[in-house]
Amino acid sequence: MKQVKGRQELISAYIDFFKSKSHKEVPNSPLIPQNDPTVLFTTAGMHPLVPFLLGQKHPLGTRLCNVQKCIRTTDIDAVGDKFHLTFFEMLGNWSLGDYFKSESIEYSFEFLTKVLGIPLDMLSVTCFKGDKDAPADKESAEKWKKLGVKEDRIAFLPKEDNWWGPAGKTGPCGPDTEIFFWVGKGKAHGNPGVNPKDWAEIWNNVFMQYEKKEDGSFQELKQKNIDTGMGVERTVATLNGNESVYDTDSLLPLIKKTEELSAKEYNDETGKSMRIIADHIRASVILLAELVSPSNVEQGYVLRRLIRRAVRHGRTLGIAGNFTHLIAEEVFKIYPDYASIQKNKDFIIKELKAEEERFSEVLEKGIRYFERLKETIKGKVIDGKTAFLMYQSCGFPIEMTQELARENGFEVDIVGYEKEQAMHQELSRTATEGKFKSGLADNSEATTRLHTATHLLDSALRQVLGSHVEQRGSNITAERLRFDFSHDEKMTPEQIREVEKIVNENIGKQLDVKREEMTVDDAKKLGAIGVFEHKYGEKISVYTICDPKNIYSREICAGPHVTNTKELGKFKIRKEEASSKGVRRIKAVLE
Ligand code: SER
């Protein structure tokens, strides 16, 4: 195997290879999308290419490649572990109606096994299993086999794993084949469908055959495209046998600088804070290089969150005084090829210093306030008013208050916070008219989400086990849902997996959750399920989870519920057990 030491080497090898296959290199686009108001950041190499994937002619032709800077904020709270990043670089190659599956797979195979010299035995692949929107991708699997990949190294997986896009709500998307590298112990074996923890994804080849429309339908694209993506940090880490992306040359110098500034070693105790600082300051520098300033809206708010969270973790490590600009100096060295960073160094440093100073003035006050709160609070929930106060007078972005709360075993009433914030804005707008609002709800965001998930679970159970399934009880806390239902036998692992799959697919479909008021009789006529303990003629709430074509669940319930299933995250069944005779109990969470 060829030794690829760092980012520059991998990037050059990749771009040179695709140039040798008649691809033209397209520039690394800005992180702030130029023509797409639906997203805050460029999240993939294909993103700036969307008009061309939909048929517009690209000035450089039909074969393109590049390295693209990306930010994904969905995992921002997970940053701190050894894998998650907000900013990362993505290598990609594209065919705009030129070559399709066969050549795309051939190129990936040649680059990995010939250019990088990875032994075939260290690789495995996944292909799309097929569903109602698109058939199973047998063609890709056959191609891999022809190239020598053994059958037991090929997994067929559903949409959650082997489908990509669209990047926003609508746009080009399609099934994909993903390539994995062995990171398990001993001799490589199995595949990501069998022993997923032993395999790390390094490359994703998307076959963009469809366009997802506003109404959720998938329409065949006239022009069939290839869109591939390979994460630079992850691939460098994998090829070097590193345990973490933070051990690569894209991040390690930042960890080392933090060690020096805090006079502490990078270890299990300090690791989380050091990784948060490394990731967040790297992302902040690259954002600042595009002349975004910290603010309370949109990209500026994300930047503010990144810098403030890094500052808090710096103080946790005992770093006194302004330090973020010193970490930034390391970022300048890692990316000599980014002209925007090199050109805007003064601006970057000035903004980092100013934001750090602004926040440092109130950070101490916020921490002290929180410590006092911890002593006096009754129960485990920090109310919305308090969380809003932390934001207003101590500059704690709500996500930081939530993180601090979690670290101390508390929850924040996020719905209450939002109400408070809305009320505050309303108050300041209408103060002169003497108006004010009241009536704050006290349902937390977590329980609201779990309530809605229970409906999806109920209908998935009926689908998998049969229509004899009826709710026998339900109990929801902020952490988990508990659902009792009529069924005589223990569920098999397959049935549990199938129920999870259906719920997650329905979450992925971004279904609307609608509330209507009606009489019990009308609800029954509409086929609503649920507990009918109501007086004749009494008005009740019925929640319907649907898209324009189908109804997935219709249930009588007292709420509270989210308005779209996309707010739910990933559904996981933790336990299935007997509750009483003929009644089973499921405990499940949203991750
Ligand atoms: N768009 C796909 C991804 O982000 C492949 O580039 O993984």
Image (cartoon, grey):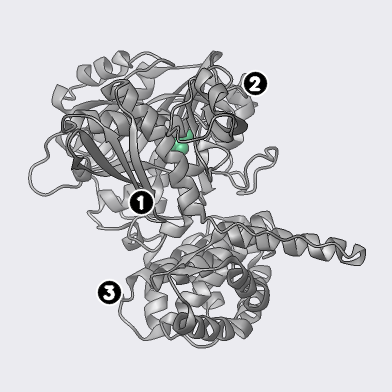
* Element assignment for label 2: loop
The residue type indicated by label 2 comes to Lys
Residue type at the position of mark 3:
Asn
Where's residue 138, x and y in %? Answer: 29, 14
Residue 407 in view in this figure = yes
How many neighbours does mark 1 have within 10 angstroms: few (below 14), some (14-19), or many (20 or more)?
many
Q: Residue at x 31, y 18 (%)?
A: 140
Which mark is in front, 3 or 1?
1
Q: Residue at x 11, y 36 (%)?
A: 189
Of the residues under marks 1 and 2, which one precedes in the sequence?
2
Q: Are marks 1 and 2 in contact (CB under 8 Å)?
A: no
**Tags 3 and 2 touching, CB below 8 Å:** no
Q: Quadrant of residue 345?
A: bottom right
Is 198 located above or below residue 7 in the figure?
Answer: above
- Circle 3 sits in a helix, a strand or a loop, which is it? loop
Instruction: Please give the residue where the numbered disc 1 appears in the rendered image.
Output: 480
Residue 256 % position (x, y): 37, 74
The vertical placement of 447 against 134, above or below, is below
> What percent of the width, then of the height, locates residue 90?
46, 44
Q: Which mark is residue 267?
A: 3
The reply to whether residue 45 is in sight is no
- Which mark is first along the chain, 2 or 3? 2
Which amino acid lies under the numbered mark 1 shown in the image of this protein? Answer: Arg
The residue to which callout 2 is attached is 57
